[in-house]
Image (cartoon, rainbow, N blue to C red):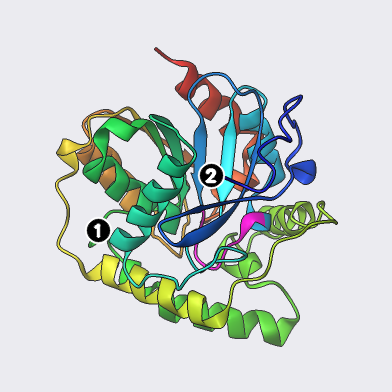
Amino acid sequence: MNDSQEVRGDAVTSYKNAPTRTITAGGVTFSYRELGPRSGVPVVFLNHLSAVLDNWDPRVVDGIAAKHHVITFDNRGVGASTGSTPRTIQEMAHDAVTFIRALGLEQVDIHGFSMGGMIAQVIAQDEPQLVRKLILTGTGPAGGEGIKSVTVLSHLDTVRALLTLQDPKQFLFFTRTANGRRAGKEFLARLKERTVDRDKAISLIAYNNQLKAIHRWGLERPHDLSVVEQPVLVANGDHDRMVPTKNSYDMAQRLPNAELVVYPDAGHGGIFQFHDRFVPTALEFLARQ
């Protein structure tokens, strides 16, 4: 079992203070955090390219955790989790299912952002009984337009960031308008609110393996999304450069039970820029019978 299973007590309500725990399954020791009430169907968050536990916007996590048991984790080889990072989205999905089952969960809601949304789609297709509802944000389907270009774009914006002494996410996640620049700075400041027990940064090897997995996803033949019968909330900004917004429209059309929300003057990180609108929308979606 994990190293601090006894430390349950009252539910943690702030991601900033959520203790980091571990659980071992399938030869991997997964690092994770949980908060919110312990009743109802948990919401498992699946993270983006290069991200560790500290890359989730606390306003989004805390907002969902006000009503739901939220679980965030580092997949295999990422952050403080052990093992080597897979080079396919399918393997990442298998590891995520291993983690979810290790916690003894029989059904979950999944929020997958960017690469996490790709993993979430595979889980919903491979393990439909495990998933009650899906929230897919800043993401796209297999073979989606522009996804194979994520590697090039990430490298270019990383160089841009180095040259201007900024965080690459300022370019990758947000528009270059005044609103976008301000939202990016506010988001990056929120990511620093947690000051103790911070996660390990992703290794260069793990990051490169993730890039390879996303590239392969972009080259895959489109999946049959009509088999995903669960309710799905799709959300993005209207100017997503990383996973072009056209992919969100495409998924919403091909998923039989989907609804789409697109935020104005927003990029890949639209749900973080508009967290004050996204959180109520997500809560209403999750609460619906």
Answer few, some or many: residues within 10 Å of disc 1's Cα (few below 14, many 20 plus, some between 14 and 19). many
Q: Position of residue 182 (x, y in %)?
A: 74, 56
Residue furthest out toward the top? 289
The majority secondary structure of the magenta stretch comes to loop
- 179 lies left or right of 102: right
Picture layout, residue 113 above or below residue 286: below
Q: With respect to residue 51, does 179 lie above or below? A: above
Q: Does the magenta run of residues contain 51? A: yes
Question: Which segment is the magenta one?
Answer: 47-53
Q: Earlier in the sequence, mark 1 or mark 2?
A: 1
Q: Position of residue 87 (x, y in %)?
A: 35, 73
Residue at the extreme front:
1
- 1 left or right, relative to 276: left
Q: Identify residue type, mark 2.
A: Pro
Residue matched to label 2: 264
Count the labels in the image.
2
In terms of image quadrants, where is residue 69? top right
- Label 1 to label 2, Cα distance in Å? 25 Å
Question: For the point 27% across and 71% down, which residue is it?
Answer: 216
Helix, strand or loop at label 1? It is loop
Residue 98 screen position, x and y as percent: 39, 49
Q: Is residue 9 left or right of residue 216?
A: right
Residue at image location 21% in from the left, 31% down from the top: 256
Q: Quadrant of the N terminus?
A: top right
Image quadrant for the C terminus?
top left
Q: Between 158 and 109, which is closer to the camera in this rendering?
A: 109
Label 2 Cα neighbours within 10 Å, binned few <14 / some 14-19 / many ≥20: few
**What's the amino acid at mark 1?**
Ala
Residue pictured at 70% horizontal, 50% vertical: 20
Q: Which residue is mark 1?
A: 142
